[in-house]
Image (cartoon, rainbow, N blue to C red):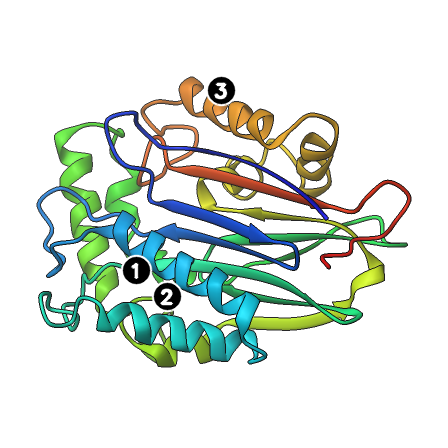
Amino acid sequence: MRVTFATEPASPDRPNEDFIAATPDAVVLLDGAGTPAGSESGCSHGVAWYARTLGSTLIASLTQSAGTLTEILAEGIKATTSLHDFTCDVTHPGSPSATVVMLRRTGDHLGYLVLADSVLVLDVVGVDEPMFITDDREAQVGRRYRTAMDALGSGTPDHTAALRAYVEAMRAHRNRNGGFWVASSDPLAAEQALTGTLPADQIRAAALLSDGASRLVDRFHIATWRQALDILDQDSPAELIRRVREAEHTDPAGKRWPRGKTFDDATAVHVTAEQGHQLRLK
């Protein structure tokens, strides 16, 4: 397979909390959930550390374990938690967390796992519109709490305070039935992931997008999933992110597209087959 990717932090003075890794038969993307200024997390390591540590654990396990993707994620969460449960309060509602997308070729099949709001887009043979998989439970819960934040201009002190209030309100619903699920300290979250298996020879290409990259389609609505795949195929993942940044700069106050973050860490991964073949990861 051929894997190309680009990743860019929201700001050059802050660490990129996304993580991407690939092997000949697997790809992993994580998007760490940032902690707003003034909010506590109970952890001295931070979100970037969590995403990198869990992501590294997952990609290693994908090359060594015959377990299901759900089992691998559960074990990865458990292992990562064990690395800081003696120094940090991993029961804190703001303990570092991340979305997870995993893609793995096993024999003639391609398995996927998606937990939380990063996006997997699959270009399926014989189908005009690509298949996209994302877990929108966080967005559904968030609609109850977004009104005050979305009414304020991004970057203002009032918006910053409203964002902190929004995040802290959402914590009461994190990793709970009736709420939404992310990778954090509870391995049981893995059981809530969206999973599936498809014939590998039916997939032309795949895209893994953090929500900072997918917002060109699912928040700004200035491209379709097909157009996003075309950008990745005809240009590059870096070009997709460039177009995201271009749109963000036209609306710095979030009036056209209300959002918690004016700019977000953005990662785009494009997985394609060798010339003349269908997608084969091994």
Label whose residue precedes the other's in the sequence (3 or 2): 2
Q: Quadrant of residue 27?
A: bottom right
Quadrant where the image shows the C terminus: bottom right
Q: Residue at x 79, y 63 (%)?
A: 200
Say what amino acid the circle numbered 1 marks.
Ser
In contact (CB < 8 Å): disc 3 and disc 2 = no
- Residue 69 shown left or right of residue 266 in the figure: right
Q: Residue at x 74, y 28 (%)?
A: 234
Give the number of the mark in front: 3 or 1.
1
- Residue 274 shown left or right of residue 15 in the figure: right
Q: Residue at x 17, y 53 (%)?
A: 45
Q: Residues within 10 Å of mark 1 (few under 14, many from 20)?
A: many
Q: Position of residue 51 (x, y in %)?
A: 34, 54
Say what amino acid the circle numbered 2 marks.
Val
Label whose residue precedes the other's in the sequence (1 or 2): 1
Alpha carbon separation for disc pair 1 and 2: 6 Å
Give the number of the mark in front: 3 or 2.
2
Residue corresponding to mark 2: 182
Q: Position of residue 134 (x, y in %)?
A: 55, 59
Say what amino acid the circle numbered 3 marks.
Glu
On residue 97, the disc is 1
Alpha carbon separation for disc pair 3 and 1: 28 Å
Q: Residues within 10 Å of mark 2 (few under 14, many from 20)?
A: many
In contact (CB < 8 Å): disc 1 and disc 2 = yes
